[in-house]
Image (cartoon, rainbow, N blue to C red):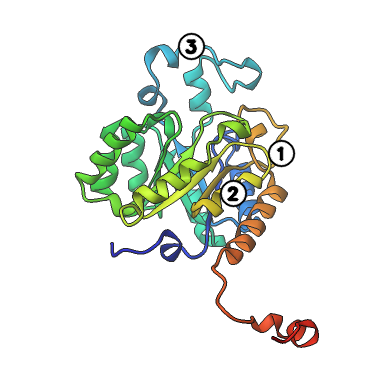
Amino acid sequence: MSFKSFKEACPVPVIVAEHCCNHMGDLDMAMQMITAAKTAGASYAKFQKWNAKEALSTEHYHSPHPESRNSFGEPYGKHRENLEFSMDQHVILKEYCDEIGIGYASSVFDCASAKQITGLNPDYIKIPSQKNTNLEIYEIVCKEFSGDIHISTGMTKESELDKILEEVDKFNSLNRVILYAATSSYPCLFEDLYLLRIKEFVKKYQGVLKGIGFSGHHNGIAADIAALALGARYFERHFTLDRTLKGTDHAASLEPQGLGKLVRDINNVNKALEFRPDGILNNEMDAYLKVKIQA
């Protein structure tokens, strides 16, 4: 990839509605969410793919859900499986996204899921924070998939991040990577967002990676605007139709109205983040002629 600033490479910010498990395993609800995300102006509706028996340790699979009121089945592995869509259902979701004009993407939590999602050829595949040190996933995604690779960095040490990017570089795929600053806390306190990591990523990876993103699990949308000013070009927020629904992620998610406001504000502030040219602006000329004291 020839050198460009991240903003030159991605002039219009990309906003992702992360559906996660907020669809509660209901295909009709997931399609309603896709429609709502499109109406709000999001660029992508993103889903997840789990093979619970591979993604979870045997102990974790057979453990109870830590918050029983939010369980969709016991033990925890059954809860995860009950929230899963089959590949046939993922095909339906992707086709619906294509039909209404919003991008489809998915996170993958294990190698089996990575192989399945590559077969759908989405615009991008994401490696989530909790699985980003499973280096086998990168070999599958880098070798069998030609789209972008999004990587989240919550719960990740700098030494681990170096190993992740070294692994991707083995397959000459760094120019496909979008690296997300993230904190794996739901909802995340503002003092735990550490937004200046975005600035560090921009400085370190400009001209190396394709872009920098911000995956936020905080309340409101103010932090996303700050992330934009610091250099993020991709914005992922958990999305729900109703924050009071059953499930662990709804409370840290945006509803359609909030997502619409995020899209509006990100795009408006993006227009404002330019250096001012020298001289009197055209839109200042009326005021200039009326009130400016001539030198």
Measured from the top left, where is residue 80 in percent x and y? 50, 25
Measured from the top left, where is residue 72 in percent x and y? 59, 23
Q: Amino acid at mark 1?
A: Asp
Residue visible at 41% across and 63% down in the picture: 9
Q: Residues within 10 Å of mark 3 (few under 14, many from 20)?
A: some
Residue visible at 31% across and 34% down in the picture: 111
Residue visible at 38% across and 26% down in the picture: 55
| Label 1 close to label 2 by CB (< 8 Å) | no
Q: Is residue 88 visible?
A: no
Q: Residues within 10 Å of mark 2 (few under 14, many from 20)?
A: some
Label ID, residue 63: 3
Pick whichever of labels 2 and 3 is earlier in the sequence.
3
Q: Camera-side residue: 7 or 22?
A: 7
Which numbered disc, 1 or 2, marks the residue closer to the eye?
Answer: 2
Pick whichever of labels 1 and 2 is earlier in the sequence.
2
Q: Secondary structure at mark 1?
A: loop
- Report the residue marked by disc 2: 226
Q: Quadrant of residue 246?
A: top right
- Report the residue marked by disc 1: 242
Q: Camera-side residue: 56 or 265?
A: 265
Outermost residue, right side: 290
Q: Is residue 279 visible?
A: yes
Measured from the top left, where is residue 30 in percent x and y? 59, 44
What distance separates the C-alpha of mark 2 from that of mark 3? 39 Å
What distance separates the C-alpha of mark 1 from that of mark 2? 26 Å
